[in-house]
Image (cartoon, rainbow, N blue to C red):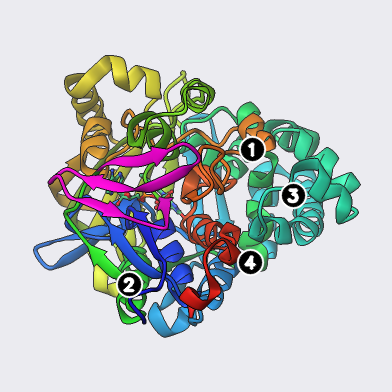
């Protein structure tokens, strides 16, 4: 690499930032990643306690094709880096007022379970729904790997009927199935566990059953953290300069150009372009200097998603405790989930996690004490105790701790991916604030899954027009 290669700075080594860094490096840029934490991976990173591996955030991969696509675009093969573990029983949803709903990889087995618990009509309606979603997903999936073009993109690809599908929220699509409420809730569980009402969730979440029965659902041996670790290794091998424990406090702007960044240690680093994997809203409200007031205003009112409360446990766990048990307590209480990694990964025997979402506004009001009390209540509940003994809480996280540890915007995981925000096009990869400022990460893609964040890093890279930088400098 010649010293004259244009220099790109990526702020943040989350999945999105690492993917963007590798993509830019492959295109000939000299790339420096500046990460505030002393480990890469962001929310998709993990930690060890007593030699046992824990994922901090993610526990399931519902979009294997998207992740494989992302690795391929980076010149890598996913299976060379991580071992995906296919889930046979993907998840079960329990509630006090209805039979359990168990979703298996196998459609027939899932439908048979629904027939036994809810009747033959329910099983038939489920099959119809999966069939319909599989068809629509096949038509819309390419859009998830392309920059957002709104209605124009849909029309250009002849997806007129599918655009009507996108106009309605998840709740409307689930209601239209005629399925009973417990089954609808079980299908929309990813919305419940994100603390979001079904009515506000975007339509593409209706694809999850089609993905589960079509491509399968997975976790990773050793933890989903291995994906971020793999991206970090690939970045280093490609020659990306990854600097950990380096907090960026300013992205310095002069008119329509950013000049570089300034770190908390006072270093000023010039750059030909900056890609921010810091939270999208924080990029505009906290980092960009001088700020673009219109952008700060436009993003300030987006609804925020709290990362919720989590307890990481070591315990004696019976082998039949499933990988994912969701609990819908009713009475206005939010969903909870028990994650039993050891059910499918013998390297993580005896590791459990309890997670529950918190409403963002509530969490801000409740502050650390109220959030801690909520976690204590969760730990004291009986629903997750069956088959679990000798429990040791080895770590906990409440929203203020997520916020401080991961440099989140107001302790949030970014704007909630509502149907309305998705239709608006979320935050653009190419920032309207400056010609050489780009965004990547969950706020720029219609979902917060790890695969989406990796794709977003690649799409951010794609938005960078190499002709803005001298080609003789590029190679
Ligand atoms: C509890 C929980 C459960 C989840 N479950 C799943 C799941 O089951 N499946 C799934 O696919 N996804 C799941 N997710 C979502 C997924 O983990 C995230 O959406 C994804 O990891 C976000 O990646 P990102 O690149 O957008 O950003 P982040 O992971 O937020 O990374 C951004 C990085 O930028 C750094 N940074 C921020 N500001 C600065 C600064 N000023 N200077 C330097 N560095 C900075 C941060 O420290 C961080 O490392 C879950 C998330 C949580 C919290």
Q: Is residue 106 left or right of residue 134?
A: left
Q: Is residue 136 left or right of residue 170?
A: right
In the rendered image, is residue 472 in sight?
A: yes
Asked if ligand 1 lies within 8 A of label 2, the reply is no
Label 1 SS: helix
Q: Earlier in the sequence, mark 2 or mark 1?
A: 2
Q: Residues within 10 Å of mark 2 (few under 14, many from 20)?
A: many
Q: Which residue is mark 4?
A: 106
Q: Earlier in the sequence, mark 3 or mark 1?
A: 3
Distance between the alpha carbons at the discs numbered 3 and 2: 47 Å
Quadrant location of the N terminus in the rendered image: bottom left
Q: Which residue is mark 3?
A: 126
Q: Nearer the viewer, residue 254 or 439?
A: 254
Q: Which residue is mark 2?
A: 240
Label 4 SS: loop
Distance between the alpha carbons at the discs numbered 2 and 1: 32 Å
Q: Badges 4 and 1: C-beta atoms under 8 Å apart?
A: no
Q: Nearer the viewer, mark 2 or mark 1?
A: 2
Distance between the alpha carbons at the discs numbered 3 and 1: 26 Å
Q: Nearer the viewer, mark 4 or mark 1?
A: 1
In the rendered image, is residue 178 in sight?
A: no
Distance between the alpha carbons at the discs numbered 4 and 1: 30 Å
Distance between the alpha carbons at the discs numbered 3 and 4: 13 Å
Which residue is farthest bottom? Answer: 80
Q: Residues within 10 Å of mark 4 (few under 14, many from 20)?
A: some
* Quarter of the rendering containing residue 372: top left
Q: Earlier in the sequence, mark 3 or mark 4?
A: 4
Q: Earlier in the sequence, mark 2 or mark 4?
A: 4
Magenta span:
249-276
Q: Residue at x 30, y 65 (%)?
A: 342
Q: Which residue is mark 1?
A: 422
């Amino acid at each position: 690499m010649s010293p004259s290669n244009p220099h790109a700075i990526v702020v943040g080594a989350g999945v999105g930032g690492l993917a963007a860094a590798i993509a830019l490096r492959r295109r000939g840029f000299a790339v420096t990643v500046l990460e505030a934490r002393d480990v890469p991976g962001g929310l998709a990173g993990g930690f060890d306690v007593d030699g046992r591996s824990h994922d901090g955030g993610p526990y399931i991969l519902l979009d294997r094709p998207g992740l494989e696509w992302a690795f391929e675009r980076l010149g890598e093969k996913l299976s060379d880096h991580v071992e995906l573990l296919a889930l046979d029983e993907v998840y079960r949803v329990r509630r006090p007022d209805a039979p359990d709903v168990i979703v298996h990889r196998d459609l027939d087995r899932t439908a048979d379970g629904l027939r036994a618990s809810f009747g033959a009509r329910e099983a038939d309606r489920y099959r119809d729904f999966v069939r319909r979603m599989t068809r629509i997903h096949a038509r819309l999936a390419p859009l998830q790997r392309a920059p957002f073009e709104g209605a124009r993109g849909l029309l250009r690809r002849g997806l007129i009927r599918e655009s009507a599908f996108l106009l309605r929220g998840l709740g409307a699509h689930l209601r239209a199935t005629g399925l009973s409420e417990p089954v609808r809730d079980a299908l929309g569980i990813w919305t419940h566990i994100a603390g979001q009402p079904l009515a506000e969730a975007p339509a593409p979440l209706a694809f999850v059953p089609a993905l589960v029965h079509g491509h399968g659902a997975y976790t990773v041996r050793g933890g989903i953290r291995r994906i971020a670790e793999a991206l970090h290794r690939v970045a280093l091998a490609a020659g990306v300069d990854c600097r950990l424990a380096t907090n960026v406090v300013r992205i310095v702007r002069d008119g329509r150009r950013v000049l570089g960044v300034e770190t908390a240690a006072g270093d000023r680093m010039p750059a030909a372009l900056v890609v921010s994997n810091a939270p999208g809203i924080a990029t505009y409200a906290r980092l960009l200097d001088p700020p673009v007031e219109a952008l700060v205003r436009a993003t300030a009112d987006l609804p925020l998603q709290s990362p919720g409360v989590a307890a990481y446990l070591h315990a004696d766990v019976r082998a039949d405790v499933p990988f994912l048990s969701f609990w819908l307590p009713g009475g206005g209480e939010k969903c909870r989930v028990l994650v039993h990694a050891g059910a499918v990964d013998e390297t993580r025997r005896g590791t459990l996690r309890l997670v529950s979402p918190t409403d963002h506004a509530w969490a801000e009001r409740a502050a650390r004490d109220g959030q801690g009390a909520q976690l204590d209540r969760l730990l004291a509940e009986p629903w997750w105790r069956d088959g679990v003994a000798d429990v040791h809480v080895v770590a906990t996280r409440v929203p203020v701790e997520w916020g401080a540890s991961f440099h989140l915007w107001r302790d949030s995981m970014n704007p909630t991916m509502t149907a309305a925000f998705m239709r608006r096009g979320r935050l653009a990869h190419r920032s309207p604030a400056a010609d050489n400022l780009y965004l990547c990460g969950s706020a720029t893609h219609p979902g917060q899954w790890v695969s989406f964040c990796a794709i977003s890093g690649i799409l951010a890279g794609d938005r960078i027009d190499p002709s803005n930088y001298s080609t003789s400098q590029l190679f």
